[in-house]
């Protein structure tokens, strides 16, 4: 699946990038289908890595959709190409924002969720850069639009971010202050953020600061969990937290 984005260059010239997304892996629910969550991998990874782990979780009512990011040049690797949801030169909320890439990936995720049945609760989760994309999608949801102004129409019920950060954090407060509806939506959207204190790829302080930013602009149902000794990977204790949180926030009934 491809997504074409456009932005105005100098004068009247318009530049376009087309993003070719990789293979999408789906984990079917083993019980009654009550929720669908798109789960996004980290930089250089692919959807199959996470689909194998998610299939083992005791969440029989969730359908997992695990897409694979486009392969593109990435600034942090000196322009070397790998799978990435957007271009990035620094894995933190301080990095310049690739708004076109973020919008394209958020739209790809929303498109994957848009065909789910009307009675199914929808969520987005991810690890590292995937978590950043999930959090960006959360801000699009509460603002009602992507960064480019196009409408965002997917109704999210839960967002999970592991070892990630919040893109576009510098402009979020000013954008939210223009909309009372955004504040209302933010207050009711549950978000779980988890971060390892020993993370040497996306430093713990970036995850903590992202949580503080989200809380300060009105995300009231936000849970932030830290893990001693955890680096840039996941552990069973963390995934247990994710499972328990999803069960509670999505009101899953069991088989």
Image: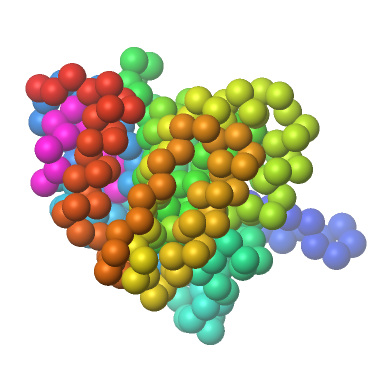
117 vs 214, left or right, is left
User: Is 89 colored magenta in this rendering?
Assistant: no
In this view, the residue in front, 119 or 22, is 119
Q: Say whether residue 53 is visible.
A: yes
Most distant residue in the front direction? 228
In this view, the residue in front, 129 or 84, is 129
Residue 124 vertical placement versus 236 (above, below): above
What is the x, y in percent for residue 31? 11, 25
Residue 18 vertical placement versus 28 (above, below): below
In this view, the residue in front, 121 or 110, is 121
Residue drawn at (87%, 57%) of the image: 12
What is the x, y in percent for residue 20? 45, 57
Residue 71 vertical placement versus 37 (above, below): below
Most distant residue in the right direction? 11
106 vs 24, left or right, is right
Most distant residue in the top direction? 119
Q: Start and end of the magenta stretch?
A: 56-66
Location of residue 28 (image quadrant): top left
């Amino acid at each position: 699946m491809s997504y074409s984005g456009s932005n105005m260059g100098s004068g009247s010239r318009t530049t376009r990038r087309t993003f070719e997304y990789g293979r999408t892996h789906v984990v079917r629910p083993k019980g009654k289908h009550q929720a669908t969550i798109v789960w996004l991998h980290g930089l250089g990874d692919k959807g199959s890595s996470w689909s194998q782990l998610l299939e083992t979780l005791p969440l029989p009512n969730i359908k997992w959709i695990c897409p694979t990011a486009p392969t593109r040049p990435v600034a942090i690797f000196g322009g070397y190409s790998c799978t990435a949801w957007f271009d990035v030169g620094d894995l933190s909320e301080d990095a310049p924002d690739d708004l076109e890439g973020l919008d394209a990936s958020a739209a790809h995720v929303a498109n994957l969720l848009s065909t789910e049945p009307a009675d199914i609760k929808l969520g987005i989760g991810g690890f590292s850069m995937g978590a950043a994309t999930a959090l960006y999608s959360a801000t699009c949801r509460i603002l009602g639009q992507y960064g480019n102004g196009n409408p965002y129409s997917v109704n999210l019920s839960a967002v999970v971010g592991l070892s990630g950060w919040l893109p576009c954090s510098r402009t979020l407060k000013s954008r939210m202050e223009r909309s009372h509806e955004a504040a209302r939506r933010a207050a009711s959207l549950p978000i779980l953020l988890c971060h390892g204190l020993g993370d040497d790829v996306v430093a713990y302080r970036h995850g903590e600061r992202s949580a503080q930013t989200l809380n300060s602009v009105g995300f009231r149902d936000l849970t932030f969990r830290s893990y001693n000794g955890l680096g840039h990977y996941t552990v069973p204790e963390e995934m247990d937290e994710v499972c328990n949180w999803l069960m509670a926030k999505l009101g899953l009934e069991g088989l």
